[in-house]
Image: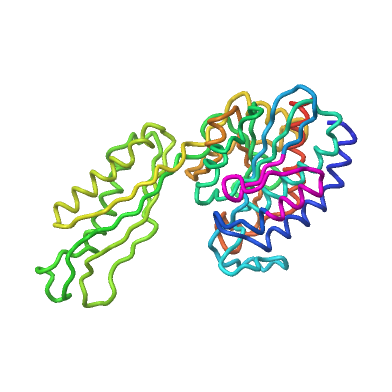
Amino acid sequence: MQQRLKKNLEAARGWTIQLRRELHKIPELAQEEEKTAALVAKTLGELGFTPQTGVGKHGVVATLDTGRPGPVVMFRADMDALPIQEESGLPFASTHQGAAHCCGHDCHTAMLLGTAKVLSEAKDKLSGVVRFVFQPAEEAVSGARPMIAEGIMDSPKVDYCFGMHVWPAVPKGQVGIKSGDLMAAMSWFDLEIIGKGGHGAMPHLCVDALEVGTQVVSALQRITSRQMNPMQPTVVTIGEFHAGTAMNIIPDRAELHGTTRTFDKEVWRTWDKRLRSVIAGVCASMGADFKLEFHQGVPPVSNDPQATDIVRKAALTLLGADRIIEPEPTMGGEDMSLFLEQAKGAFVFLGAQMEDGFPLHNPKIVFPEDILATGVALNCQIAWDLLT
């Protein structure tokens, strides 16, 4: 990496941290990222870009075109927050009731803005195009598809795409790089059990939707234990179960909401059929009916071997072999997978482990700010290696 780029990286360190703090204070839920997108666009404008706004509703895209032939390299960051009341105690904690950046998307956005700043200052040394994509609605896995549909991977076509996630399961200061499957395919479903309500003392006159629901929950777990290859990880989780209004009323309705995870694309495509078959069997045996809405979700995050090697080489140059690990795959899902289906690319875990040990999506989680400089530097090293 050129000496001037290193100086620019050092100069951007405090700027990136301050920007992250501003973003952290204004968390917005999926498809509500108006203030966040406005701040991103304003910052890009101040850096000399003419950003596209409103891409896929609240997405922002900026392009650095050097005017010289070379590859088209895309970097992506997600912008949305979680429906959580923050308990971090930070002086720059969320000012939005019931919303918080407990998954680190404020870090991702700030790092990508830092990357845009540093690379724009080195434009005269690069050959090719860099596209900076700020995506809404990752938590709702509904942000990537509309941006892709609006053509952000084309004109000119993206050759390589990269993304990064701050990751508490990786030691602070280390980088997790893995070829192949890194994150699972995910889907989700909404289920309504329809029974026949009545008096709690007269169950023989009713069809207890709550009881049917409990049997459904139990039966769904047998998909993973009895239908799936035990050597291939799969998960069915029911995260919500709502039924009943009083202790002496047998409910006629039960609502269940859940998610499925797998690394196997064929299994991912069959979840709807499998769930429907099990639910229909339980309900029929107990005299209930049901309504199931299944949402296909996104495929696995699978890193291209060539792109992974590019990231690994950049990390070796920047950090050295002792700060690179191969992380365990996770059953968490990410719509970065949709970008990786469009171009060779890789998703990277940036170590964010703290002594308190709080995981992602916890209201008390705090991300170490000094890792932001590492994320910016790694992005810039990747771009430098590909465009010089």
The picture places residue 290, in percent across and down from the top left corner, at: 23, 54
Q: Which residue extends farthest left?
A: 204
Residue 150 position, x and y percent, is 57, 38
Residue at 60%, 62% in the rendered image: 100
* Residue 240 in which image quadrant: bottom left
At 83% from the left edge and 47% from the top edge, which residue is drawn? Answer: 12
Q: Is residue 202 left or right of residue 329?
A: left
Q: Nearer the viewer, residue 359 or 91?
A: 91
**In the displayed structure image, the side of residue 196 where residue 259 appears, left or right:** right
Rendered residue at 77%/54% (across/down): 17
Displayed quadrant of residue 161: top right
Displayed quadrant of residue 158: top right
Looking at the image, is 216 positioned above or below residue 69?
Answer: below
Q: Is residue 241 visible?
A: yes
Quarter of the rendering occupied by the C terminus: top right
Residue 171 visible somewhere in the drawing: no
Q: Which residues are magenta?
A: 38-62
Q: What x and y, as percent, mark residue 360? A: 57, 54
Q: Position of residue 167 (x, y in %)?
A: 61, 47
Q: How many marks?
A: 0
Where the N terminus falls, by quadrant? top right
Q: Residue at x 26, y 45 (%)?
A: 276
